[in-house]
Image (tube, coloured by chain):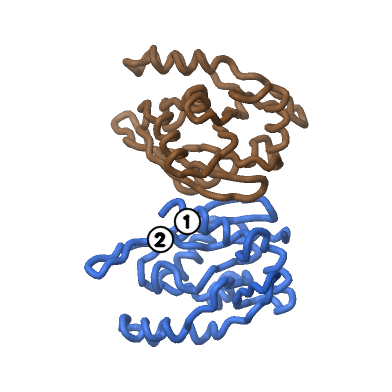
Chain colours: A brown, B blue
Amino acid sequence: MSSMKILAVEDCGFKRTIKQKQKEALLVGVIITGFRIDQVLFSRIEVDGLDATKKLIDLIISNGEEVELIMLSSISYGGFNLIDPLKLYNVLGVPVIVVNPKKPNSLAVESALFHHFNDWKKRLQIINRVGEPEELDLKKGNKIYYHIFGIEKVQGEKLIRSEICFGKIPEPLRIAKIIAHGIK
Amino acid sequence: MSSMKILAVEDCGFKRTIKQKQKEALLVGVIITGFRIDQVLFSRIEVDGLDATKKLIDLIISNGEEVELIMLSSISYGGFNLIDPLKLYNVLGVPVIVVNPKKPNSLAVESALFHHFNDWKKRLQIINRVGEPEELDLKKGNKIYYHIFGIEKVQGEKLIRSEICFGKIPEPLRIAKIIAHGIK
């Protein structure tokens, strides 16, 4: 476990049916230092909107606590509301790691964007800038997929490994997921 | 840190003004084993109602996860909605520890009950059955106040001490408090 102050971000589930979809989803941010949970933050984002990056930046700035690393479980929150990790890094100057236990299916995402969003080009631009994830081999033949912004690859991989305690999800994201799941 | 599966219970804040008070408060339950957060549960209770004991019992039973210890930060949740630790212990067969960093002011509580509740006798009965808390000396001259049901005093005190990592609140309750505070 590193001793960095890490903000891990997850979203709470929301309802989506053919007839109706929930307008807003809840973003959960958990600040953790080593094994210590320091704070839990919440923000509302629009389902399938494009406000998640700004909402997360506002949340971090207004909270005032200086985080040293942001961990995302994906770049899509609340449906296809994309959090742009590069923008987070550029605006906040805080390194960002996106860690996903599953390989993101970029073709499926692109197709969904193209078919359901008028602003698909704008969204695709973010996805393309983020690029393809790196693969990291864990114990027992497990793999995870990650993107790193603002840290060297070797250092980033070491950090990811050090944060994995139970299962294959880094601890801050695992805890954020549990809280988000409970709220759903 | 013990390796017991502990359920710690906190409530989220609610609004109460002279003219108006929120009808419901949210109960947050966090299940923790050692350093690992396993689950976060939620239940709604009536502000100043008397449904918290039943709601907590229902929550634990419906969740199905076998907890080995219940930790409460007080017996009053959502205003004066009392959680009866003896009833929890009798119904669920799970030991209960109430740990409070401040000495509960039972005279003030009794007076508030008498002046604001028609069913003050019923509430006072619970408080009287729970009785006066024990005092436990911590490091640096700190004290906490506790009640134990279903465990021997010596063992209970050892357990409380082992769960205190940061500050003077046992870790499961500290985490439940942080989550509850974030939701408020």
C-alpha distance separating marks 1 and 2: 8 Å
- Vertically, is A32 above or below B90? above
- Identify the residue shown where x is 41% and y is 54%: B184
* A73 or A2: nearer the viewer: A2
- Identify the residue shown where x is 60% and y is 76%: B146
Residue A44 image point, x, y percent = 38, 39
Instruction: Name which quarter of the figure residue B22 lies in.
Output: bottom left
Which amino acid does the dot numbered 1 rest on? Answer: Ala
- Identify the residue shown where x is 36% and y is 71%: B49
Disc sitting over residue A128 in the figure? none
Residue B162 image point, x, y percent = 72, 64
- Vertically, is B112 above or below A33? below
The answer to whether residue A142 is left or right of residue A5 is right
Which chain's residue wears label 1?
A: B
> Which quadrant is the N terminus of chain A positioned in?
top right
Which amino acid does the dot numbered 2 rest on? Answer: Gly
Which chain's residue wears label 2?
A: B
Read off the residue under disc 1: B180
Residue A164 image point, x, y percent = 69, 38
Q: How many numbered markers are drawn?
A: 2
Neighbours of disc 2 within 10 Å: few (<14), some (14-19), many (20+):
some
Read off the residue under disc 2: B13
Q: Are marks 1 and 2 in contact (CB under 8 Å)?
A: yes
Instruction: Name which quarter of the figure residue A163 lies in.
Output: top right
> Which quadrant is the C terminus of chain A positioned in?
top left
- Vertically, is A109 above or below A36? above
From this viewpoint, which residue is outermost toward the right? Answer: A140
Residue B143 image point, x, y percent = 63, 75
Neighbours of disc 1 within 10 Å: few (<14), some (14-19), many (20+):
many
